[in-house]
Amino acid sequence: MANPSRLRAAALTTTTVLLAALLAGCGQSAAHVDVNAQKLEWSDCPAPSEAEGGGSAPSPLPNGTKWSCATMKAPLDWARPKGDTIDIALIRARASGPASERIGSLVFNFGGPGGSGVSTLPAFAGDYAALRTRYDLVSFDPRGVGRSEPVKCLSDSQLDAFFQQDATPDDGAERTDLLKRTKGFNAACEKNSEQVLPHVRTTDAARDMDLMRRLLGDDKLHYFGISYGTELGGVYAHLFPDRVGRAVLDGVVDPTQNPEQSALGQARGFQLALDNFAEDCTSKTTECPVGDTPQDVKNRIAKLLGDLEKKPIPGIVPRQLTQTAATNGIAQALYSKDFWEYLTEGLEQAYDGDGKILMLLSDSMNGRGENGEYSNIAAANIAINCADEKPRYTADQVERKLPEFRAASPLFGDYLAWGMLSCTDWAVPGAADHPDVSAPGSAPILVVGNTGDPATPYEGARKMVEALGEGVGVQLTYQGQGHGAYDSKNKCVQSAVNGYLLDGKVPKPGTVCS
């Protein structure tokens, strides 16, 4: 199961896969090179690899601009900068405006962790057309992701089976089975990716970005981070405060929380999003097909999940919709208000015994394409989180916390609590309880929080501003729904973000958009 507490931006990195379904490798090198002396060689982009999600090579932008790709060599171990290297895949679209008005490169990270920036940026480029007037748009596959020495764990058929199994044990036998499956998954990651696992921490990716900045020819890093990308941006600012240019953090991870606190916050966040979905459906003038009142909507969903635990229904042949897959699909749909119509249709069909839409939503969360191939987002997500996060939880600890999680969310509480076992028996020790993002001396960083965000609850924006330090973080609030704010198309948010990135105009702290 791809747990939302681990996949902090799955909706962003898999949206194109989801909509297509609903509406229709570079290795390590032993060469000892001076990575600072290399020159990026840009050429036409190939089709995305299986680990990046597959599909076709990116099409030119509306004005005919072609996408270019390059490979950057970075030290596998930043503590040994002259040792073995790892290949980092990059993608770029040149600025559309006059060269005299070009600011530099704007580097994107769309989250996950584990999302492929090389495959995601072309899918969302239209949203950033205004920014491309003065920036080259650049993204990358962080180490362990996509084409950048992807972490490998299970085969596609093994993942099909893994994601079908019960993720919320109800008794000792089911708990033992969950622990066994988790241990088996983690052992497979170690067997297949042992060399790279110690070197996929967020601090490693931040150092890669600083090397990228130099090779792109920029004195400062101009950056747009979404979801987990906000954590990466905060860590970069902590390590290199004097090299921060114009930076925006949207859909903000709370940098002060440990994994347990983060999972509990997400339980509250997804419950809020479910409450808002139910209220929206039942408040319309036409009849809500999945419930008469908000509570009735939630009661019927709870009954559906209880029934699925006893007897799954047909999903996508030959797979069935299990309780786990249905919960996963519901969570996926709550990432964006644009997906609520699919959630309504999926629930309506599931009540009639057809689980196809909810399974498509779950597949999107897990990175599964229509051809049955998986991207490596789930494997990379766990590898990066487990390398970053020091706490290791036991089943007994989770069981003691279940009442608190259930109080936060009757629907998602168990699901998120048991997800804390993801790093149990992981081969690499975690780095810290939570990331350090203090960045005294940094240029202003615009921090955008969404009051209805399920995956990165709104409170995280304020915590990020405080943690960055006085005079650094500037908070902008969006009173909306879904994960993140800029891609909501809200004109107030986009005007504020564009004003800063394009013209250097910092919004007044505490600005609110609705």
Image (cartoon, rainbow, N blue to C red):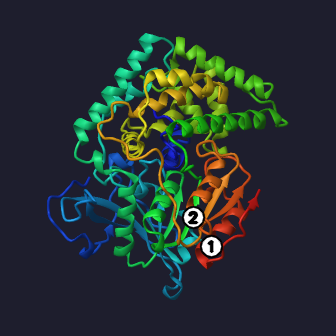
- Asked if residue 221 can be seen in this view, the reply is no
Which residue occupies the extreme left position in the image?
Answer: 31
Whether pointer 1 and pointer 2 mark residues with C-beta atoms closer than 8 Å, the reply is: yes
SS at mark 1 in the image: helix
Q: Amino acid at mark 1?
A: Tyr
Q: Between 424 and 24, which is closer to the camera in this rendering?
A: 424
Per the rendering, the mark at residue 248 is 2
Q: Amino acid at mark 2?
A: Val
Q: Quadrant of residue 410?
A: top right
Instruction: Examine the rendered structure and indicate whether residue 49 appears above or below residue 415.
Output: below
| Position of residue 442 measured from the top left corner of the image (x, y, whole percent) | 53, 71
Say few, some or many: other residues with alpha carbon within 10 Å of mark 2 (under 14 / 14 to 19 / 20 or more): many
* 190 left or right, relative to 391: left
Instruction: Examine the rendered structure and indicate whether residue 381 appears above or below residue 44.
Output: above
Instruction: Examine the rendered structure and indicate whether residue 211 appears above or below residue 19.
Output: below
* 509 left or right, relative to 430: right
Which residue occupies the extreme right position in the image?
Answer: 285
